[in-house]
Amino acid sequence: MLNARSRPAVLINETVNSNHWVLLKLVGSRSNRSAVGALARLTAGGRTWVDEVRAGRGYQSAEDLRLHFGLGTNAVIDRLQVNWPSGLTNVWTHLPVDRVLRFVEAP
């Protein structure tokens, strides 16, 4: 929806369901601080999702640098692997869902 030269619209999704989600906030230490270019591979319940931190898209706006994963009925993240732009790889296991998780690139 584009509201050029008019009042903004606020859209609120009030749907209730039992699905789970996670937002990943990646912070680079050796790589760029915004972690642009970092690749996240998340596994839960035998299924794997992959996403990359990107910047520079959007019309008259900035996109969210956090990665959003819809996990369906999976109530735990079995494994998260992050390949950082520096070439480092970090792995975390048995992570909680339904929240924002922050990960800093380990040296």
Image (cartoon, grey):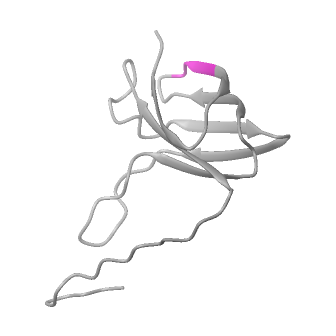
Foreground of the two, 13 or 43: 13
Please report the residue visible at 37 percent of the width from the left and 62 percent of the height from the top: 57
Which range of residues does the magenta coloring cover? 87-91
Q: Residue at x 48, y 30 (%)?
A: 85
Side of 58 where 77 appears, left or right: right
In this picture, is 22 found above or below 87?
Answer: below
Vertical side of 45 occupied by 90: above or below: above
Q: How many marks?
A: 0
Is residue 89 a member of the stretch shown in magenta?
yes
Residue 65 percent across, percent down from the top left: 39, 47
Q: Closer to the camera, 97 or 18?
A: 18
Q: Is residue 19 above or below residue 7?
A: above
**Which of these two is toward me, 95 or 88?**
95
Percent from the top left, x then y, of residue 19? 68, 56
Q: Is residue 88 left or right of residue 100?
A: right
Residue 49 in percent (x, y) is at 70, 47
The majority secondary structure of the magenta stretch comes to strand
Q: Residue 99 at what x, y percent from top left?
A: 50, 41
Q: Nearer the viewer, residue 22 or 63?
A: 22
Query: Most extreme residue toward the top, as rendered?
Result: 107
Task: Check the image and report above or below for 92 versus 100.
Answer: above
